[in-house]
Amino acid sequence: MKILVNGAWCETAATDLQSALEALGYGGSIVATALNGEFVPVSSRRDATLAEGDRLEVLAPMQGG
């Protein structure tokens, strides 16, 4: 299925948010996620199912000041 990840269309076989993150290379990273504009905590990522056309935002913390 196709999902929009940080503004770019991606093809994925993942059916849940955690699997998608692992497939996209974020598996071991500390990131914040939003699915269709709603924040998804780490504890809920396996339960967050994906559907064709979903919008996923992945944000990594930045250092500096």
Image (cartoon, helix red, strand yellow):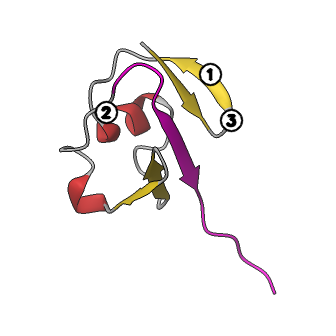
- Reply yes or no: does residue 63 show up in magenta: yes
In which quadrant is the C terminus drawn? bottom right
Give the amino acid type for the residue marked by disc 1 in the picture.
Trp
Q: Secondary structure at mark 1?
A: strand
Q: Which residue is mark 2?
A: 19
Looking at the image, residue 62 lies above or below residue 30: below
Q: Which x, y percent locates residue 21?
A: 42, 39
Residue at (79%, 81%) from the top-left corner?
Answer: 64
Pick whichever, 51 or 28, lies toward us.
Answer: 51
Q: Is residue 51 left or right of residue 62?
A: left
Q: Earlier in the sequence, mark 2 or mark 1?
A: 1
Q: Which residue is mark 3?
A: 7
What whole-number distance in Å separates the C-alpha atoms at marks 3 and 2?
A: 19 Å
Magenta residue span: 51-65
- Reply yes or no: does residue 35 show up in magenta: no
Give the amino acid type for the residue marked by disc 3 in the picture.
Gly
Q: Which x, y percent locates residue 32?
A: 48, 61
Label number found at residue 9: 1
